[in-house]
Amino acid sequence: MAQSLKASFLRGVPELWAESFFRGTEKVIKRHKSLADVPGPTTLSFISDLFCKKGLSRLHELQLEGKAKFGPVWKASFGPILTVHVADPSLIEQVLRQEGKHPIRSDLSSWKDYRQCRGHAYGLLTAEGEEWQKLRSLLGKHMLKPKEVEAYSGVLNEVVGDLVKKLRHQRSQDERLVVKDISSEFYKFGLEGISSVLFESRIGCLELTVPQETEKFIQSINTMFVMTLLTMAMPKFLHKIFRRPWQKFSKGHIDKRMAEVAEKVSRGEAVEGKYLTYYLAQEKLSMKAIYGNVTELLLAGVDTISSTLSWSLYELSRHPEVQTALYHEIRDTLQGRLVPSAADVTGMPLMKAVVKEVLRLYPVIPGNARVISDRDIQVGEYTIPKKTLITLCHYATSRDEKTFPNPDKFQPERWLKKDTSFHPYASIPFGFGKRSCIGKRIAELEVYLALARILTHFKVKPEQEDSIVRPMTRTLLVPEKEINLQFADR
């Protein structure tokens, strides 16, 4: 039929023009493929990859395999959820530029079901629409402006000081000055740091004996991130059976701080708040909304800091020449001072390059997501229907050799070359746009301050030179085994 149509058209029409017309038509047709045309594995093979080949722990590797096998766009079903994977910087940009006024990151249905069942308010991670926009605007005033973030450097430096003391104690327990499982230590540091920002109070994570309540909270967060992937594949009625005790923990600390403020006000004393809970109260948010937001900020902030610090020291220990150069940069910037300020960090380009490279290799969230709810969108040559879950494969794009030569190598200098530029969406570990990580600036500051102090005091080496630690997926990207490092005196 198509050939006869083409033949009839060609009669009396210059051949070159006709061929050009049909080539153009074919291109147009190719650009309008549907969701059904998107390639991908069979449901059976994908389930086999996930549950028979440790796929849940290697979802980041499945991104690389999917891209190699199907191209930059493919689809797969995860339990009841169909998701379209996008693993190309230009196509990720295309998706994010169509996300609309109130972008939806993904449907954290198990988190939402838990909150609805218990009458809790949504926070910034789970809220949507106008409610989300209001929360984002309020929190952004205190978490995204550089001057506002600098105000937290004093309390963060106090926490960093306690971290250095804890590392000294931990290494003293080993004759080779080795600290076992640094991720665990940095996890507690991250929780202590974000708590100091939220409550301006300490919760004992860096004490030699961690309070039982705090230890229970730490374990509940670990369990929550493990279960999040599993509950996505479960029927919704099962979500209610999984307990999540973190709300009670944060509520107790919020109530304590608000009671202290109320007591000062009753005595006619001036109240100066530098912690985030106080600021939220001044914005006249309901206590229910404050509980929800502070709880979700606690959950979001801990692993970002823990993971980035752990991988940073892991790579610096294996690249002593980079570690030495960074130490010299810190020493020259501080000029004899031991405690850096937020302003000092601006004079440390290698420090920033090291953290960028670590987050390229080990993005805390290996795959982000978007749901475009109000319209169909174009992604490359495919039209993706509205309300389709789209997974943005950041791990795959940040390890693409077309963008990053030697993609599996730790090379911070790639970010310092003035004549080199990368696609701005090739490595976006904190996301992009309105749904980007609102705690980015605080997390980066905490990591910079910690790295500067640690490298000022210690020369970090691997426990064993040939020990390789690879990442695994636990909703977030984490080390698959303990990272053990030697902390020698400078």
Image (cartoon, rainbow, N blue to C red):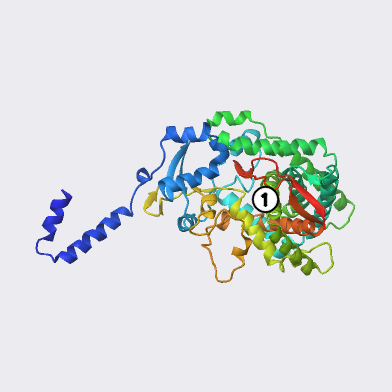
Side of 161 relative to 1 (left or right): right
Is residue 35 visible in this depiction of the protein?
yes
Side of 304 relative to 17 (left or right): right
Residue at screen point 41% across, 49% down:
71
Is residue 201 visible in this depiction of the protein?
no
Residue at screen point 50% across, 54% down:
400
Image position, residue 32 (x, y; %): 33, 52
> For the residue carrying disc 1, how many other residues have a C-alpha within 10 Å: few (<14), some (14-19), or many (20+)?
many
Side of 22 relative to 371 (left or right): left
Inspect the image, locate mark 1, and give the three-letter code of the amino acid beneath it.
Trp
Image position, residue 381 (x, y; %): 36, 53
Image position, residue 268 (x, y; %): 89, 55
Q: Is residue 250 above or below residue 47?
A: below
Image quadrant holding the C terminus, namely bottom right
Residue at screen point 33% across, 55% down:
31
Image position, residue 333 (x, y; %): 77, 69
* Residue behind mark 1: 311
Q: How many marks?
A: 1
Q: Nearer the viewer, residue 245 or 359?
A: 359
Q: Is residue 323 above or below residue 392?
A: below
Which type of secondary structure does the marked residue at label 1 adopt? helix
